[in-house]
Image (tube, helix red, strand yellow):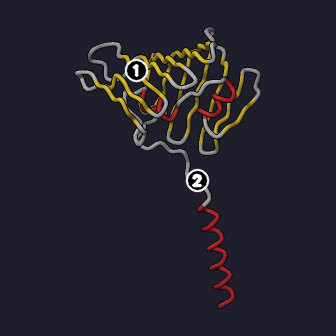
Amino acid sequence: MTVLFRCCAALCAVLLSACAGISPPRAVDGVPAFELAGRIVVRYQERGFSSSLRWKQAPGRDDIWLAAPLGQTIAYLEADANGATLTASDQRQYRASSIESLTKSAFGWRFPVDGLRYWVFGEAAPGAAAAGIERDDARRLVRLQDGDWQIAFNYAAPDATRPSRLDIVGNDAEIRLAVDSLLRDAP
């Protein structure tokens, strides 16, 4: 009985130590599921890129489609706790640890998804090294610096609660995102 007890205790210790090395899922606390449709323009390395954008965000998962003007998908990005995958229009796949590192290696510019999921709602990302926060008379964010990103929030109307356009400048790219629709708690 003592040998069996020691074996079970050793097995439990091994299993618990194996679990300690597993990183938790990339759940995003405080961000509701959402679906965004819009347009994106990127300037980087004396080049430019433009596309329509569709983004479905759920806790622990992002799905982003970049499409040409006639609607054909240029790239599909997906990310979860296992990392990020880009599927190009020719069906070739590329993988990285995050969407930001994946877009940097595949496109030459970083797409700041971790902050952007808050910025589209006119909010600073919690826990971010936010600085240079400016608000308008309605207390809405109009300017923010988050790490090496400088974000300008543009609102379509004086009573709008979320930005209709974000102008985002980083070390390697200038990104303009026009938000056409944004649905909270989308499945």
Tag 1's secondary structure?
strand
Residue 49 location (% of width, % of height): 61, 14
Work out whether residue 100 or residue 67 is closer to the camera in this orientation and state it.
100
Residue 176 location (% of width, % of height): 49, 17
Work out whether residue 164 or residue 3 is closer to the camera in this orientation and state it.
164
Tag 2's secondary structure?
loop
Find residue 122 and name its label: none
Q: How many marks?
A: 2
At label 1, which amino acid type do we have? Answer: Ala
Decide: few, some or many residues near mark 2? Use Cα within 10 Å; few <14, some 14-19, many ≥20. Answer: few
Mark 1 near mark 2, Cβ–Cβ under 8 Å? no
Whole-number angstrom distance, CA of label 1 to CA of label 2: 33 Å
**Most distant residue in the left direction:** 137
Q: Quadrant of residue 21?
A: bottom right
- Mark 2 lies on residue: 23
Please, is residue 10 above or below residue 42 in the view?
A: below
- Mark 1 lies on residue: 152
Please, is residue 50 above or below residue 4 in the view?
A: above
Mark with earlier residue (1, 2): 2
Q: Quadrant of residue 10?
A: bottom right
For the point 59% across and 14% down, which residue is it? 51
